[in-house]
């Protein structure tokens, strides 16, 4: 007698639903753990410095504006609110912005090597900022620097999009074109520095190495506002970004306007990166490494990957800033140097791990 065939589809559906719910709970727990780690590291960072402040007094200082009266001495209030908190918020939001730029570019180009740094967006924005500083459009202040950085970042994005439309252009050729643009804009910045005076050279060097030494409430506010505008749009299009991973033809067959989505995302990434670079300079490796670490933890579903990448980027840059401040105190290292030292071996490890697992 032949065995009775097992029921397949209907019997497996509850299992699939249970597995999905279990994955969703696990991803929720991972996001919560990342958020708690970020809060703990940030609070610890606020206590460290030339004046060590106990955690309790740091928390009271943070709560002071909500309560009348003097909860902590005025000097502690000033250190927390005027020095450490704006730097922390700038590091946090800049890390989130660069990491989000990296994960969006990797999805749009379907290439794990894509990032604002490797595609030349950061170096283009740095050149735009350097030109404003050196040629003396100081009357426009930071608005002029941010606007010109944005224009150059948009120019690089359009070049990448045009190259992408070229017949036979592959994701790898786009990355190679981006690396060429990165070196080209880097050479232009070096040339501009070569013909500038000593003061302008010192000013521009800030943008070439990446630093948080000029973080203040202006930088913290502008980067935060930009992030609050851009991040909800990324999350709103998370499902469309998932469809894009299936390939352009499949995404079009599902009704997705691929070209329109790609242009919108590139413009938003350019805006976000330009604002971050205008205040912090070109901080390398963050937009490359943070998305890979988040993807290893939480998978490729952009509904979870986007917030995980943002949290990971913020966490990495806050930790890097603490290392830059305290590793060789009282000497303060540029944070871009720390991300390069930490990011290079980490990225090599990720490449070897992917190859060992049969990945690209």
Image (cartoon, rainbow, N blue to C red):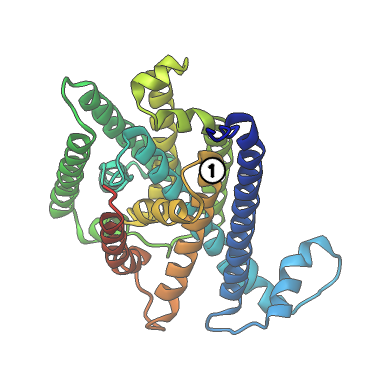
Q: Position of residue 200 (x, y in %)?
A: 26, 55
Q: Quadrant of the N terminus?
A: top right
Of residues 290 and 330, the one nearer the viewer is 290
Q: Count how many numbered circles sit on residues in the image.
A: 1
Query: Relative to the observer, which residue lies in front, 37 or 50?
Result: 37
Rendering quarter of residue 83: bottom right
Looking at the image, residue 57 lies above or below residue 207: below
Identify the residue at the far right of this view: 68
Q: Please tell me which residue is depicted at 32% across the width and 53% down the height of the picture.
A: 282
Q: Residue furthest front?
A: 1
Please give the name of the residue rendered at 16% of the width and 47% of the height, measured from the top-left corner: 183
What x and y, as percent, mark residue 285? 32, 56
Callout 1: SS: helix
Residue 31 in the figure: left or right of residue 191: right
Dot 1 corresponds to which residue? 227
- Can residue 128 be spotted in the picture? no
Q: Is residue 317 above or below residue 247?
A: below
Q: Quadrant of residue 340?
A: bottom left
Tell which of 167 and 177 is nearer to you.
167
- Residue 16 shows in the view: yes
Looking at the picture, tell me which residue is in the foreground, 13 or 76: 13
Give the percent coordinates (x, y) of residue 23: 60, 49
Q: Is residue 336 above or below residue 156?
A: below
Position of residue 228 in the picture relative to residue 174 (left or right): right
- Few, some or many residues within 10 Å of mark 1 (<14, 14–19, 20+): many
Q: At 17% across and 48% down in the image, what residue appears? A: 192
Residue 354 image position (x, y, % from top left)? 30, 55
């Amino acid at each position: 007698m032949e065995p009775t065939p097992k029921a397949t589809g209907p019997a497996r559906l509850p299992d699939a639903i249970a597995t999905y719910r279990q994955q969703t709970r696990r991803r929720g727990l991972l996001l919560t753990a990342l958020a708690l780690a970020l809060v703990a590291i940030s609070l610890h960072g606020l206590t460290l410095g030339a004046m060590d402040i106990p955690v309790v007094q740091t928390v009271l200082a943070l709560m002071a504006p909500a309560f009348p009266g003097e909860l902590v001495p005025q000097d502690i209030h000033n250190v927390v609110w005027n020095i450490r908190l704006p730097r922390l918020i700038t590091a946090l939001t800049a890390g989130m912005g660069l990491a989000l730029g990296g994960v969006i570019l990797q999805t749009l180009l379907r290439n794990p090597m894509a990032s604002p740094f490797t595609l030349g967006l950061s170096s283009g924005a740095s050149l735009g900022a350097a030109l404003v500083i050196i040629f003396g459009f100081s009357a426009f202040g930071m608005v002029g620097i941010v606007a010109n950085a944005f224009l150059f970042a948009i120019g690089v994005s359009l070049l990448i999009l045009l190259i992408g439309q070229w017949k036979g252009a592959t994701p790898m050729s786009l990355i190679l074109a981006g690396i060429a643009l990165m070196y080209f804009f880097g050479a232009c910045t070096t040339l501009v520095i070569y013909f500038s005076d000593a003061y302008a050279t010192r000013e521009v060097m800030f943008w070439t190495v990446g630093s948080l030494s000029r973080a203040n409430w202006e930088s913290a506010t502008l980067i935060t506002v930009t992030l609050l505008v851009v991040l909800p749009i990324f999350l709103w299009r998370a499902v469309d970004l998932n469809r894009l991973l299936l390939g352009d033809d499949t995404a079009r067959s599902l009704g997705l306007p691929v070209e329109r989505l790609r242009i919108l995302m590139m413009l938003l990434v350019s805006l976000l990166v330009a604002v971050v670079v205008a205040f912090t300079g070109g901080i390398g490796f963050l937009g490359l490494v943070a998305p890979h670490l988040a993807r290893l933890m939480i998978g490729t579903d952009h509904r979870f990957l986007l917030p995980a990448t943002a949290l990971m980027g913020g966490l990495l840059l806050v930790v890097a800033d603490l290392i830059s401040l305290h590793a060789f105190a009282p000497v303060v290292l540029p944070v871009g140097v720390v991300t390069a030292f930490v990011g290079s071996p980490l990225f090599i490890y990720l490449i070897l791990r992917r190859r060992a697992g049969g990945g690209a």
